[in-house]
Image (cartoon, rainbow, N blue to C red):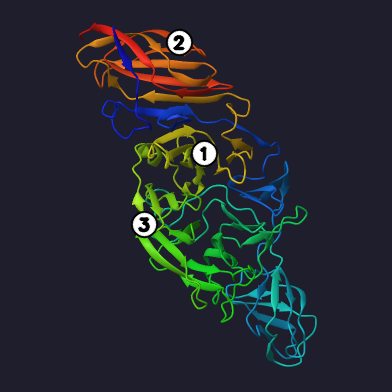
């Protein structure tokens, strides 16, 4: 009789043959590795019973001045907020911000009622209703009021005033404000591909080339300006919501009309709102490498002057900006090509400085990065995993389960990838769309980045289109395609329903010279809730025919499980599917005897 302790190192390894990776865990779902041992992930429970409107891609928790938890949800068609157990719609009604124009932007012609407005890069279309205010007299008329756009060019548009000008003139003063009534519209649910590298099907487009059109699913960048919410739907403007559930989010006055990604930079003297990839200040034309920020403590000041701290920068290096994160006091900005770091200088003529610190390590999607401490983790367009800490350089992360992710990521849907952290376990997680399941997020993979066993990877089957860590909320929050929102790592079931998990080892010999006959397994488990099933798969050669035995049921507190299993190479699988279910594995012992040479 021989006894073997089952003591397998933490983490999944599946990028090589089953036999060559032994003794390792090879496959699993919803089982993490914590303090060196495998255990089931936590369950989930309903956050709010009301389903979200639209497909949610971003969730963001923060607290207001009364320390009350707010959770914002950005979907393809709506912006909603959860407060005090209730879900409210704060979806904007307007698509464009109020804009203070450059000096004397109005032109009129004697004896006509046509007013021409100089507004570089405007997004007005014929038939739009527009409010003109703040204008002083020009050509004998004071053309303020609500009007309909009659004609447009790239940098001008016209409307008809209620009376004719008495002279030909240009003027209007320095405080002309244009407020468009263009309506906020829903975005795409799915990506449809483009000619830009990394934005369409795998391999389409040249390296670093920007997309020439909006082919992306609607994602949001959400942040807090103190107690207020700052929200940016990709390729829309930036909105602010001031905490009143009876008033919807409104465009930030003078913010760029088109923004790829926005964030808020906290400074010692206040805050600044950043627009990453946006409309240029002077031309109004969208530049995918342009960065603009508001003045400090004034998020409606976006004009560069000698007395303001609002500024504009244009990155070099090609590609397009995809997203950004604050990492400590610095800002990381990713393009499709590389990584830039922004440093606050504090000079009036140059508040910030941006430098490229890595190339060929860009970002695959606007939500595919997460920050732990002062280190960022992300996925690049070539489906590699990366990390970079402050003061360091981008470094690839070895991922022994990467082929399963890279080979099955749904083409043209990579912008749906969402990264999140699970601080309780020191993990970074990526939810992604797997082609084996369709076009929506259906699976995830995660890596431990701190604690006793950094570098341990695991994966799971779970459909979450948005995920965000705990803090200031008590638990992480996840959202499904159907709009159901859940507290995660809470309870031991799938909101009261069955939760499934499994963990399977690679093939390994118990004795390389003889077959073995397994008679029983002595469990070593902790916190078991619900039945655990044990299945053995054996064969006599590394590529021989497999034979399965089981599943054998291990009840709670059972001290021995009798089995009858014979072979030379053995795989063992632990699984569960019940409500509730929970399991943490120690070092179980296999009781075996020689079964003869074969």
Toward the bottom, the furthest residue is: 167
**Which of the two labelled residues, at mark 2 and mark 3, occupies the earlier sequence position?**
3
Identify the disc placed on residue 559. Answer: 2
Quarter the N terminus occupies: top left
Dot 3 corresponds to which residue? 392
Residue contact at pointers 1 and 3, CB within 8 angstroms: no
**Residue plotted at (55% across, 68% down):** 293
Relative side of 470 to 546, left or right: right
User: Which element type, helix, strand or loop, lies under badge 1?
Assistant: helix
**Which of the two labelled residues, at mark 1 and mark 3, occupies the earlier sequence position?**
3
Q: Is residue 76 visible?
A: yes
Q: Measured from the top left, where is residue 122 in percent x and y? A: 61, 72
Badge 2: how crowded within 10 Å, few (<14), some, or many (20+)? Answer: few
Badge 1: how crowded within 10 Å, few (<14), some, or many (20+)? Answer: few
**Which corner quadrant of the image does residue 86 belong to?**
top right
Q: Real-space Cα distance between discs 1 and 2? A: 31 Å
User: Which element type, helix, strand or loop, lies under badge 2?
Assistant: loop
Relative side of 465 to 21, left or right: right
Dot 1 corresponds to which residue? 424
Identify the disc placed on residue 542. Answer: none
User: Which element type, helix, strand or loop, lies under badge 3?
Assistant: loop
- Residue in the foreground of this view, choosing between 84 and 130: 84
Residue contact at pointers 1 and 2, CB within 8 angstroms: no
**Residue plotted at (59% across, 80% down):** 307
Is residue 254 depicted above or below 57 in this figure?
A: below
Quarter the C terminus occupies: top left
């Amino acid at each position: 009789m021989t006894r073997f302790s089952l003591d397998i190192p933490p983490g999944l390894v599946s990028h090589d043959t089953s036999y060559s990776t032994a003794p390792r865990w090879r496959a699993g779902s919803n089982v993490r590795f914590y303090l060196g041992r495998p255990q089931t992930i936590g369950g989930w429970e309903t956050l709010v019973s009301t389903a979200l409107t639209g497909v949610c891609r971003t969730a963001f928790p923060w607290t207001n001045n009364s320390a009350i938890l707010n959770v914002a949800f950005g979907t393809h068609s709506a912006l909603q907020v959860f407060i005090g157990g209730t879900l409210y719609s704060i979806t904007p009604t307007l698509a464009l911000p109020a804009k203070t124009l450059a000096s004397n932007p109005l032109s009129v012609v004697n004896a006509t009622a046509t007013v021409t407005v100089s507004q570089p890069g405007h997004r007005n279309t014929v038939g739009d209703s527009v409010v003109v205010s703040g204008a002083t007299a020009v050509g004998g008329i004071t053309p303020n009021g609500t009007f309909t756009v009659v004609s447009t060019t790239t940098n001008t548009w016209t409307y008809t005033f209620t009376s004719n000008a008495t002279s030909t003139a240009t003027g209007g003063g320095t405080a002309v404000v244009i407020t468009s009534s263009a309506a906020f519209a829903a975005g795409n649910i799915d990506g449809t591909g483009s000619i830009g590298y990394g934005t369409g099907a795998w391999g389409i487009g040249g390296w670093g080339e920007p997309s020439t059109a909006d082919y992306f699913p609607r994602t949001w960048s959400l942040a807090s300006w103190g107690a207020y919410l700052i929200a940016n739907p990709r390729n829309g403007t930036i909105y602010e919501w001031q905490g009143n559930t009876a008033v919807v989010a409104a465009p930030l006055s003078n913010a760029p009309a088109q923004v790829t990604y926005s964030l808020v930079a906290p400074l010692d003297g206040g805050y600044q709102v950043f627009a990453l990839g946006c409309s240029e200040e002077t031309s109004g034309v969208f530049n995918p490498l342009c960065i603009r920020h508001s003045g400090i403590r004034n998020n409606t000041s976006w004009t560069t002057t000698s007395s303001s701290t609002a500024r504009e920068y244009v990155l070099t290096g090609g590609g397009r900006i995809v997203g950004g994160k604050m990492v400590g006091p610095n800002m990381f900005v990713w393009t499709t090509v590389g990584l830039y770091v922004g440093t606050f200088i504090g000079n009036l003529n140059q508040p910030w400085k941006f430098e490229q610190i890595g190339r060929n390590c860009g970002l695959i999607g606007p939500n595919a990065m997460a920050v732990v401490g002062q280190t960022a983790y992300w996925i690049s367009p070539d489906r590699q995993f990366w990390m970079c800490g402050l003061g360091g350089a981008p470094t690839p992360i070895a991922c022994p389960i990467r082929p399963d992710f890279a080979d099955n990521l749904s083409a043209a849907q990579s912008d749906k990838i969402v990264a999140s952290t699970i601080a309780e376990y020191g993990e970074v997680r990526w939810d992604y769309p797997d082609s084996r399941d369709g076009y929506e997020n259906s699976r995830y993979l995660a890596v431990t980045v701190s604690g006793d066993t950094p570098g341990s990877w695991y994966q799971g089957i779970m459909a979450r289109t948005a995920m965000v860590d705990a803090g200031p909320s008590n638990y992480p929050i996840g959202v499904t395609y159907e709009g159901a929102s859940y507290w995660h790592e809470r309870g031991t079931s799938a909101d009261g329903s069955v939760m499934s998990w499994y963990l399977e080892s690679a093939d390994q010999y118990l004795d390389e010279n003889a077959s073995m006959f397994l008679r029983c397994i002595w469990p070593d488990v902790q916190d078991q809730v619900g039945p655990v099933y044990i299945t053995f798969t054996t064969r006599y050669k590394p590529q021989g025919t497999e034979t399965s035995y089981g599943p054998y049921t291990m009840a709670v507190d059972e001290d021995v499980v009798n089995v009858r299993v014979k072979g030379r190479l053995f795989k063992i699988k632990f699984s569960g599917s019940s409500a509730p279910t929970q399991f943490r594995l120690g070092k179980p012992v296999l009781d075996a005897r020689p079964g003869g040479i074969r």
